Amino acid sequence: MNHRSNQSGFTLIELLMVSLLLFMLAYATFMSTRSTMAVKRGVDSRTELLQSGRSVMELFSRDLRASFFVDANDLGWNPKQPKSEEERLAEGETDPERIPIEGEEGYIPPPPPKPVPVTIFQGTANELLFSTRSHQRMNADVPENNEHFVRYRVEGNQLIREESFRAINKDDVTDDRQFRSFVLLENLSSIEFSFWNQKAERWDDRWDTNSSDNLDELPDAVKVKLKYTPEKMEEGEGATKEVEYESAIRLTQKFFKEKAIKYP
């Protein structure tokens, strides 16, 4: 007796259909992955383009938060003044107009010389010059200290940062040999500084610790508005657009004081 086989296999058409479906699935996965990678490259490229602006704003924040201004009293200079004629008369002196000389009772030696702090804060709409403690010494043998002057200014379409090696003499402010210069940004469109005046409750477009309006006082905060056009990272990229950053940085004000000198 003959037995017929009941086994059956895939036909050629079925195999072609399965292969086509697998190809379409692989192609769809490939295109999805390719699109995702293209988006990621675009985001990474954009992030890299904007990184320079973020770095500049972080540098502004570091310098301004470490800025300081001190006067002679902050350095401990608070000498006792000679008594007035009324005070000496009230204490029973027979001749209040006579000033005691050295060795006599009631004599007050002359006050110590008034120290001259080497501090400054001057700002306009597009330039800053101030004393700060943000300096990092790179070599112990170099005559530098932690306190130095920083200047931000615009030259053409470049944002320039200048920092001095030290801040121990007022002549250091005007001595270009004491400053190092760095280009922070190219293709700068504009930069604008404004200074918060707590007393007047407004933003001012200039500040000077040597002026009568802001004598010996730092602004409570500095607002920075920055516009620039990032450079393209690779050839063939589309034109980059102008970007804008804005931040208000609060200053620490006078964050150190010395005890007053005991005098006499």
Image (tube, rainbow, N blue to C red):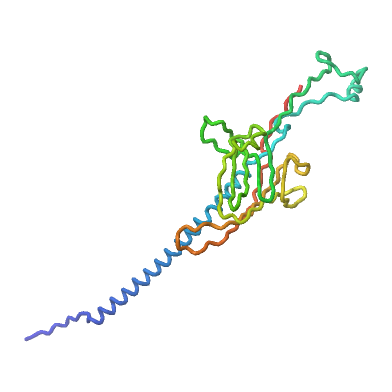
In the image, residue 12 lies at what x, y percent? 22, 81
| Quarter the C terminus occupies | top right
In the orientation shown, which residue stands out farthest toward the top? 103
Q: Residue furthest bottom?
A: 1
Residue 76's image quarter? top right
In screen coordinates, is 161 left or right of 23? right
Q: Is residue 229 above or below residue 140?
A: below
Residue at image location 25% in from the left, 78% down from the top: 15
Residue at image location 55% in from the left, 53% down from the top: 186
Q: Which residue is more in the foreground, 93 or 65?
A: 65
In the rendered structure, the answer to whether residue 155 lies left or right of residue 80 reads: left
The residue positioned 87% from the left and 25% from the top of the image is 84
Q: Is residue 145 left or right of residue 42?
A: right
- The foreground one among 90 and 152 is 152
Q: Is residue 240 above or below residue 158?
A: below
Give the residue displayed 91% in from the left and 23% down from the top. Answer: 90
Quarter occupied by the N terminus:
bottom left
Question: In this orientation, which residue lies closer to the viewer: 44 or 220?
Answer: 44
Nearer to me, 217 or 186: 186
The answer to whether 254 is drawn above or below residue 55 in the figure is: above
Residue 210 in the image: x percent, y percent? 74, 40
